Amino acid sequence: MIKDELFNLLNSWENLNIIITTVLEQPGYLPLLMDIAINSNESKSWRAAWVADKIHDVHPEMITPFLDQMIHQLKRENNSSKKRHFLKLISMHEIPSRRNSFLMNYCLNCFSSATEPVAVRVYALQILFNISEKEPDFKAELLSIISYETEIHMAPGVKAKGKNLMKILKKQIKESESGIIR
């Protein structure tokens, strides 16, 4: 299978399960799929990111080698569907410390943007929380940001995720202040 053949298969929803099965059985096709997901500007290239997400559900280790490329692509990605899948996949893995600064800034912008889709904002928030787990000094600031954003942007998904993470952050900050080691 070549790139054009794979892209043609991605044009039809009926083929997506076939692509998933093929890539799981023949992982040699994964770099081709990921090249479309990450580098293509075609309008339906987000389907390759969706397929990668489904492959991740079964074998996350297959997608892990492409996380750095996904992070790098976020700098120029305009397709909100691809951003959603990239952020979801990134949020489910350990973030390389060399990428913390970029992801913190990027995710803060996404989370605080009323124009971003709810799912993009929710996954950006999860990444910010993940960063706070490695950077405890960021927890109090993140708590303030979440509190502010959930008040002004009332999207139910953002509000629910924010409320859950605020509860965890408050507990962690309280434990930290009282000297409890978790």
Image (cartoon, helix red, strand yellow):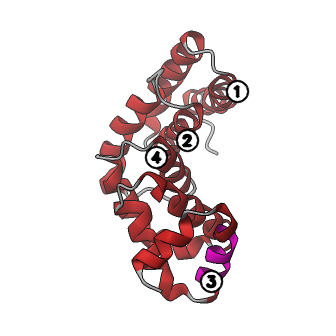
Q: Position of residue 164 (x, y in %)?
A: 69, 30
Q: Residue at x 59, y 17 (%)?
A: 150
Say what secondary structure mark 4 lies in.
helix
Residues in magenta, as a range? 16-24
Disc 2 designates what residue?
123
* Residue type marked 4: Lys
Q: Earlier in the sequence, mark 4 or mark 1?
A: 4
The first of marks 4 and 3 along the sequence is 3
Q: Type of residue at label 2? A: Tyr
Q: Which residue is mark 1?
A: 160
The residue under label 3 is which amino acid type?
Thr
- Does the magenta run of residues contain 19? yes
Q: Tell which tag, 2 or 3, sits nearer the viewer.
A: 3
Q: Position of residue 104 (x, y in %)?
A: 38, 39
Q: CA distance from mark 4 to mark 1?
A: 21 Å
- Estimate the spatial distance between the alpha carbons at disc 2 and disc 4, rounded to whole Å: 9 Å
Q: Nearer the viewer, mark 4 or mark 1?
A: 4
**Front tag of 1 and 3:** 3
Instruction: Determine which residue is flagged by label 4.
Output: 83
Q: Mark 1 packing: few (<14 Cα in 10 Å), some, or many (20+)?
A: some
Looking at the rendered structure, the number of numbered marks drawn on it comes to 4
Disc 4 + disc 1, Cβ < 8 Å: no
